[in-house]
Image (cartoon, helix red, strand yellow):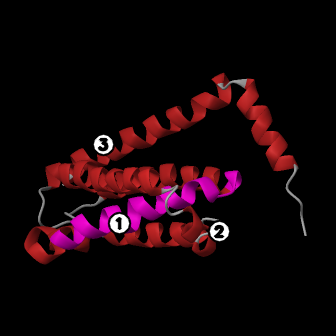
Amino acid sequence: MTTHIAVQLAGLAIAGWLLGMALRRRLAGASRMTNANGLCGLAIGLFAALFWMLPRTLDEVILDARMEVAKFLTVPLLVGFPLALSWPRLNPVLRGFLKATLISKLFVLGWIYMAAPERLCTSYLQSDQVLLSELLYFLAGALTIAWSLPLFFGDGASDRHRLQSFSQFKYG
């Protein structure tokens, strides 16, 4: 379970992200028309990621080879790829909100896997579920630290540039 979620799903999403980063310039025109503010790609990526987070889906991947193939196709193409195209177009406030939401979801999922009296994924052992919960706690803490460090040790130039571009935003 830990390997499945932390290595396979994360690795496939990162592969899709890297593909999106590599093709971003080639797809700039089409992306500008269909994903102007990044919300369309964000919605696709988040809904696909939510589907693959469900314990029932994780069990089906183990039991059905078609679901395994679907995982290897949809996670890179429907999670990582659209998020890579959308992330630079998102408002900085929305990006911060998504980071905070991800951290809180990792903590909550870790707590659910730890506190559940029985296995949530029937194809995996209870001990693997506990190990996954500890890993999710660790990832949430590591991301909190990694994303907070620039707030304390960031270079002033990039911070000033961000503030200037944000202050030029016109309302209405």
Q: Residues within 10 Å of mark 3 (few under 14, many from 20)?
A: some
Q: Is residue 64 visible?
A: no
> Which residue is at 77% across, 37% downward?
161
Q: What's the residue type where badge 2 is placed?
A: Ala
Q: Image quadrant of residue 115?
A: bottom left
The first of marks 3 and 2 along the sequence is: 2
SS state under label 1: helix
- Residue in the image at 75% along x and 41% along y: 162
Residue at x 31% of width, y 64% of height: 75
Q: How far across and how far down the image is residue 134, in percent?
A: 30, 42
Q: Is residue 172 left or right of residue 129?
A: right
Q: Give the residue type that dot 1 points to.
A: Leu
Residue mark closest to the camera, 3 vs 1:
1
Residue 82: percent from the left, percent from the top?
Answer: 46, 64
- Which residue corresponds to mark 2? 36
Residue on which the image places disc 1 = 77
Instruction: Count neighbours of disc 1 (C-alpha within 10 A) and say few if under 14, some if 14 to 19, many if 20 or more.
Output: many
Q: Is residue 71 magenta?
A: yes
Quick check: can you spot residue 97? yes
Disc 3 marks a residue whose amino acid type is Glu
Q: Label 1 to label 2, Cα distance in Å?
A: 19 Å
Is 158 one of the magenta-colored residues?
A: no
**Residue tagged 3:** 134
Overall secondary structure of the magenta stretch? Answer: helix
